[in-house]
Amino acid sequence: MSAGAPHVPVAGEASVHPPAVPLPSVLRAYRNVGYWLLLLPVVIAAGFWVPNLSQAPHFPARITPTVHAHALLLFTWLALLVLQPLLIRSHQMDWHRLLGRLTYILVPLVVAFAIAVIGKDYRDEIASGMTAGAARDSEYLASGGVVLIILFYGLAMLRIRQRNVGAHLRYVVCSAIVLLPAGLSRLLGFGFDIPQGTGQIVSFAAIDLVLLGLIAYDRRHGLSHRPYALALVACALFEGGWTALGFPV
């Protein structure tokens, strides 16, 4: 064959471009999850539009640089939650792994700035005349949400290190679902004049229904739903604690 002639495969010769490796059954079952997760940043952006985003670029004093950094990190995390399953769907596994490794930096920053914002809000409430106990209780929802993110993200990373792709995927989905109240409760309050406590109850109900729906989906497809069952228990304990405190917001 001449140096410049094109290569023509012959019978029995391996292809120069091997076919894409078929996705495991769990990934095929969840091949469209990235499109469903697109709803999450839409709901959160809508919820934060009136109290925060609509005031750009002249933000009130309560929206400090720490709050801006927290929002930027949170929306970056949301973007990754949407992008990662889409990369799997298109067989872009190298990019998926690279961005997954970047979350080892991103998620601790998300958590650190979330804690910083919680501390800021607590101090602001004390300065406004709220008692220390009431101010502490009012930060229960935000603090519990951070704990759930740490829990589900940590389990997701542990499972992928154990090469349990199905559990990894499900715990990542759980870490996304628990972000829902941050946007939905505000959207209901600012958009429809629904009291914040009622909006939070609706948000919790939505999370529980989504988890129950995912459990039913996995059972229907003969897949393990254990991560969703654990998440449902964790969320129920979180909701029970909020109820025991008297529904502080």
Image (tube, rainbow, N blue to C red):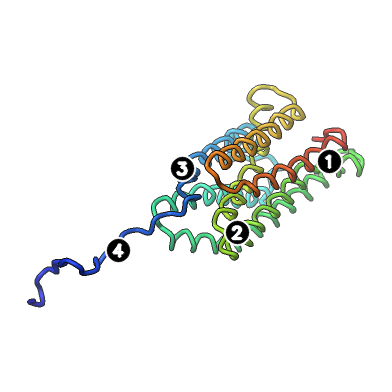
| Label 2–label 3 contact, CB within 8 A | no
How many discs mark residues in the rendered view?
4
Instruction: Give the mark nearest the N terminus, 4 or 1.
Output: 4
The amino acid pointed to by label 2 is Leu
Instruction: Find disc 2 in the rendering and name its residue.
Output: 106
Residue 164 in the figure: left or right of residue 31: right
Residue drawn at x 58%, y 55% is 168
Instruction: Find disc 1 in the rendering and name its residue.
Output: 241
Q: Determine the image quadrant of residue 1.
A: bottom left
Instruction: Find disc 4 in the rendering and name its residue.
Output: 18
Residue drawn at x 50%, y 50% is 26
Is disc 1 placed on a helix, strand or loop?
helix
Q: Nearer the viewer, mark 2 or mark 1?
A: 1
Separation of disc 4 and disc 1 at Cα? Answer: 54 Å
Q: Nearer the viewer, mark 1 or mark 3?
A: 3
Q: Nearer the viewer, mark 4 or mark 2?
A: 4
Instruction: Find disc 3 in the rendering and name its residue.
Output: 32
x, y percentage for residue 47? Answer: 62, 34
Separation of disc 3 and disc 4 at Cα? Answer: 25 Å
- Mark 3 crowdedness (10 Å alpha carbons): few <14, some 14-19, many ≥20: few
Q: Nearer the viewer, mark 3 or mark 4?
A: 4
Looking at the image, the residue that sits furthest to the left is 2
x, y percentage for residue 192? Answer: 65, 22
Instruction: Give the mark nearest the N terminus, 2 or 3.
Output: 3
Separation of disc 1 and disc 3 at Cα? Answer: 34 Å
x, y percentage for residue 27? Answer: 48, 50
Separation of disc 2 and disc 1 at Cα? Answer: 29 Å
- Mark 4 crowdedness (10 Å alpha carbons): few <14, some 14-19, many ≥20: few
The amino acid pointed to by label 4 is Pro
Q: Nearer the viewer, mark 4 or mark 1?
A: 4
Image quarter where the C terminus lies is top right
